[in-house]
Amino acid sequence: MNLRISQIGFGLLLSVAVNAVETPNPPKANKQFSTEQSCVEPIEIMRRYHGHFLKHHRNDTMHSGVRTTQHSLIECINCHVTADDDGNYPNVNEGSEHFCRSCHNYAAVTIDCFQCHASKPEKK
Amino acid sequence: MGFWTEFYALSFYLATLILLAGLAHKIYQYAKTPAPLKVPTMPAPLTQRGVVLRLLSEVIFFRSLFRANKWIWLFGMLFHGALWLVLMRHLRYFTEPVWTWVVLIQPIGQYASFAMMLGLVGLLVRRIVVERIRYISSPSDYLMLILLLVIGGSGMMMTFVAHTDIVQFKTFVLGVMSFDWQEIPTDSMLLIHLGAILLLMIIFPFSKLLHAPGVFFSPSRNQVDNSREKRHVAKWAIKQFETKQN
């Protein structure tokens, strides 16, 4: 059955001029969170709820003074925003090169994090 | 390719085909239906331009409904107006790159969802609570409202509570549009949302939802009041008259 459905799909595919589907292309992170897990939560959860984690963390920090690193924006940026060969970091205000912008542009979700926070890693 | 991806991709082709072919058929049928008599509801516009304005005021402001029943007008207006905003917000899934104005209305569309649900609940409560409306309500009337409530409810759940992977979903939509299928995220809210939309698309050409194209073909609204200036004769009436004479 699956084969037949795929065949119909293939037939439709042949009958129409095919454009490759555009997908966002975020840069790879610097390192893994642990050997079992690549990010601070499982990838499937991060893709859906990273906004919640950041807002929750913001409230904890703002109102209770709790400063942990697992869900902190600074650590996201440190790991995910990577420099090109010349050592330059992508601009968060234009293009889709910046890690956050690559998907946020694609999904038309605007964020105001970087009106205050740094969009580039801390200098070490 | 997962089962749900194939199921929803094929269902979308089928539902789109039924919707477009069904609508085309019904619009053709409406256009061909004779309107033998001059019956514009007075006071009626005296020119073609006036008729365009009259129809626009019907389509945009539901003028006749406003004069007939303020409550239905209020809930209908809330629902339809908000639905437009919500639909335009969804354009982000079908276009790449996303147009700037679609990016700008994203938050407005989120708030509009509350107005939309309020309007739908109002219309459903009316069907159940007003006795003479309940008497003339058919299962189809309830089905359309419930489908729209399920669509709106599951959509709001995804926006505000249980998110789905919207980036993956957009690649699925673009994939369906370009016949190059990509995996769909299998979150239950998304599958419910899409399932209800598919059903609504399929019943659209067979139900009262046809009021959308139908409003333009209403003889009492789309005729010019020029019965003194111009003789109004139906074509088939002339033909019958001529054959009798010969």
Image: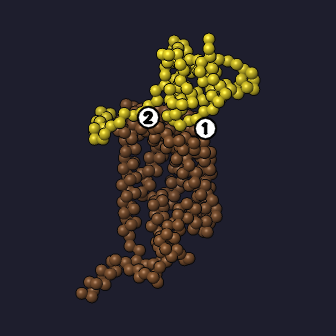
Chain colours: A yellow, B brown
Relative height, residue B123 to residue B193 (above, below) = below
Residue at 49% x, 39% y: name it. Answer: B98
The residue under the point 58% across, 62% down is: B61
Q: How many marks?
A: 2
Which amino acid type is marked by label 1? Phe
| Viewer-proximal residue among A3 and B48 | B48
Provide residue B127's location: percent of width, then percent of height: 58, 59
Q: In this orientation, which residue lies closer to the viewer: B141 or B119? A: B119
Place residue B110 in its image quadrant: top right
Q: Position of residue B216 (x, y in %)?
A: 46, 65
**How far is mark 2 from mark 1, CA to CA?**
22 Å
Q: Residue at left 50%, top 42%?
A: B99
Say if residue B199 shows up in the picture: yes
Give the position of the N terminus of chain A as an image quadrant. top left
- Name above or below for residue A91 compared with residue B229: above
Front-most of residues B38 and A87:
A87
Q: Disc 2 or 1, which lies upstream in sequence?
A: 1
Disc 2 secondary structure class: helix
What residue is disc 2 on? Answer: B171
Task: Tell me the chain of label 2.
Answer: B
Instruction: Please name the residue shown 59% across and 57% down the image.
Output: B77
Left or right: A63 in relation to B187: right
Horizontal side of residue B216 vs B112, given as left or right = left
SS at mark 1?
A: helix
- Between marks 2 and 1 in the image, the one whose residue lies nearer the viewer: 2
Residue that carries the numbered disc 1 in the rendered image: B160
Q: Determine crowd level at label 2: few under 14, some 14-19, many 20+ residues with C-alpha closer than 10 A.
A: many
Specify whether disc 2 shares its chain with disc 1: yes
Q: Are there few (<14), some (14-19), or many (20+) residues within 10 Å of tag 1?
A: few
Three-letter code for the amino acid on which mark 2 is drawn? Thr
